Amino acid sequence: MSDEEHEEQLIQAPTSSFLTYMSEGDQLYQKGAYAKAINSYTKALNLEPYNKNCLVARSRGYLSLGDSSSAYRDAETSQQDDKKFCKGLYRKAEALYSQGEFELALMFYHRGHKLRPDYKDFRLGIQKAQEAIDNSVGTPKSKAQLRRQKQASKMQNKKVGEEEPKANKVVLRELLGELYSDKEYMEKLLKDDDLSQTSTSSGTTILDLIMSGIAFLDTRTEFWRQQKPIYARERDRRMRERNWKITREQERASPTKYILYTLEEIDQMLASGNAEDSQKKAKKLLVTVENWTKLDVPNKEEVIGNLYSCIGNAQIELGDMTKALENHKNDLELAQEHNLIDAKSRALDNIGRVYARIGQFADAVEVWMEKIPLAKTSLERTWLFHEIGRCHLELSNNEAARDFGEKSLSCSEESGDEEWKMNASVLVAQAEMKLNNYRAGVIYFEKALEKAVLLNDERAKEAILRALCKCNLLLLLRASN
């Protein structure tokens, strides 16, 4: 056995197995194979029985299968040594909500929100739990108003030093687009005590309307943050705005208004987790648009391509990757035939995502390489270079993985996105480790750790720390030889 193999055996035997099972579980969960994901998490927990991140991951898997009792048990265990472990607290609240224990769920959502006011899921949990209680017992309006007033007072009393970092505001602005100014305006209104207590003619206070609007925007922000890279949403919005201008100039606004309104409904359905209805509505609109003439819809090909994209994205969420790939390829074919550059970029983006999700990394790389000249913003290039690098890492093309990781890091510096700086640094560090460049690996893991601390991302911080310790140990072992 060589020295290098001996080092790997010493360092990786227990840790690598745990990380492998954990990663396998995460991938299976993303594919919708919840039972298999639970099995992988269980194998990981056999090696590290009280790993709290693995416990909350398995809790999430149990809940996806409808086993709320097991989900609650894992969430409870994850807090065994740390009652303030927010992810365990959130999973416990979700399990209780699933069991219909709305009051208890609300208590834990509030507890979590108090510990982590920056964690939007707790705020959304408070909203849905309170609404469930209101619907089930018929809470008087005055009580609902009091609840909103308490939420509003927290925002009104927010100290200047607690404002969101500039980088986060940039990300929010890109996620919400033109709605960002509405969110800022509503948050300013909260500071006006006299105005916020004013009632409308229907008896609803201005405060109620403001809090409902902020809650809606928070929900939309979280959906787009999880489902789509920021640049993709901005690109689609820009394309639709251009299409609207074309049809309005030709004084054929009626079909376009109907299309834009329906596309917004399709997006909202997907945002709320209703992929099945989103797909059905998109297919129905596709049939309608196909029967219209070019006089009705001058940009007909762009609209049809957009609908293929919507259908494909819904099918990704439903786990039907074969049909998703077919629809995104239809989008690409239309874009190439009619020289629609933005649509081509969108289609290549989505086709690459499908290939990566099903493990065809070489195909994903080929598609995304074609997209590189079409990338327009530094944020778009950050994401694209990172995903190509990840695919190369999966294919053991470690030098290419490092190169694309460095490109992603450079672009993330331009965009000012701290989370992508962290992701890109981790990618470079992993590639350097694979290349046995342990000193370089340590440097980049340390950079990534700084960003994880800045972002207050506990899970990322723990994972990076484990990798950093392993890389440092390998470096010491090499030096001792």
Image (spheres, rainbow, N blue to C red):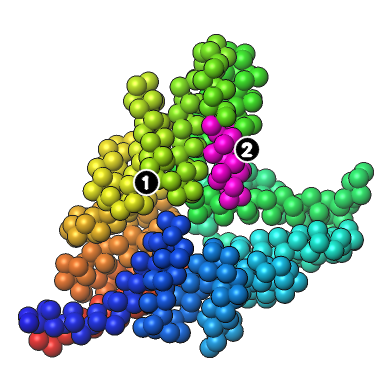
The residue that mark 2 highlights is: 265
The residue sitting at the top extreme is 295
Q: Is residue 328 left or right of residue 427?
A: right
Residue type highlighted by circle 2: Glu
Spatial separation of the CA atoms under disc 1 and disc 2: 24 Å
- Quadrant holding the C terminus: bottom left
- Residue at the spot 51% in from the left edge and 20% down from the top edge: 290
Q: Position of residue 164 (x, y in %)?
A: 58, 61
Residue at the spot x=45%, y=22% of the render?
301
- Which of the two labelled residues, at mark 1 and mark 2, occupies the earlier sequence position? 2
What SS does tag 1 mark? helix
What label does residue 354 carry, if any?
A: 1
Label 2 crowding class (10 Å Cα cut-off): few <14, some 14-19, many 20+? some
Residue at the location (49% across, 48% down)?
318
Any part of residue 350 in sight: no
Magenta-drawn segment: 263-283
